[in-house]
Every structure is written in structure tokens, then in C-alpha cells.
Image (cartoon, rainbow, N blue to C red):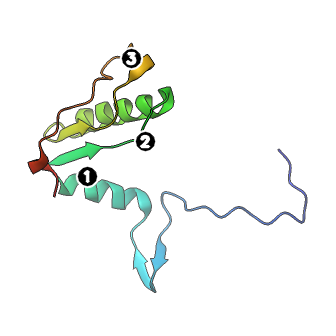
Amino acid sequence: MRRSPEAPPRASLKWTENRKENGKEEAPVFEEILRLIQAHEVIILHRHSQPDGDALGSQIGLKHLLLANFPGKRVYMAGDAAGRYAFMADSVMDEIPDALYP
């Protein structure tokens, strides 16, 4: 898609760019996400209610990605039942004890 010369550039935050918040230099987004994953033993993945296939697929895929790369982590999925997407592998949500929430 080609833009007209008058169109303003889109604002974006690149994964590797440092950002400033309240005048303070912040770590690049990817590094911050990685730091948060490494800092927690339990990760609970939420998604929107009445999920479509994209929401479920993203949640399931992220859970498998985290477990493959951080085998010591306990990763849970929270949300409504999969409904018509129940055919998707691993689409059953986890029972999460209240004690796991901070």
C-alpha cells in the first residue's frame, strides 16, 4: 500500500528500541517482556471472553512457546470455555487456584 506524501508516519515502538517514560530510559520492549517472564515462576495467560479461534490459538501457542523455552515455569490458561473451538488441541482452560494470583 502506498501512502500519499501528506500522510503522517505511523507511530510504532520497535521491539529493540529504548523508550522514555517520565523522562526515564526504559529497556526495549522485548527485553522487558523477557525480564518479566524470567522473574516469575507462575504465568497465567488471559484472553478476551467469548474467544474466537485467533484468541484461543494465540493463548495456546504462547503457552507452548513458554513451556518449551522455560521448562521450569508453571504456565496456565484462563478464560471462557472454548465452545465451538473445543476441537483445538489443548483448548481446555486450566483450573487455577486463587492462591496463584498475587
Q: Quadrant of residue 35?
A: bottom left
* Closer to the eye: label 1 or 3: 3
Residue 94 place in picture, x, y as percent: 21, 31
Q: Which residue is mark 2?
A: 48
Mark closer to the chain start, 1 or 3: 1
Relative placement, left or right, of 52 versus 6 is left
Residue 15 place in picture, x, y as percent: 49, 57
Q: Which residue is mark 3?
A: 88
Q: Residue furthest top?
A: 87
Residue 63 place in picture, x, y as percent: 30, 35
Amino acid bearing label 3: Met
> Which residue is drawn at the image coordinates 45% and 34% (left, top)?
55
* Closer to the eye: label 3 or 2: 2
Relative placement, left or right, of 45 versus 73 is right
Name the one closer to the observer, 59 or 84. Answer: 84
Amino acid bearing label 1: Ile
Which image quarter is the N terminus in? top right
Q: Which residue is mark 1?
A: 37
Residue 6 place in picture, x, y as percent: 89, 66
Q: How packed is label 3: few (under 14 Cα within 10 Å), some, or many (20 or more)?
A: few
Relative placement, left or right, of 76 versus 51 is left
Determine whether the residue tagged by mark 3 lies in a helix, strand or loop. loop
Is the residue under label 1 in contact with that under label 2 (CB below 8 Å)?
no
Q: How packed is label 2: few (under 14 Cα within 10 Å), some, or many (20 or more)?
A: few
> Which residue is drawn at the image coordinates 61% and 61% (left, top)?
12
* Closer to the eye: label 2 or 1: 2
Q: CA distance from mark 1 to mark 3?
A: 26 Å
Name the one closer to the observer, 35 or 88. Answer: 88
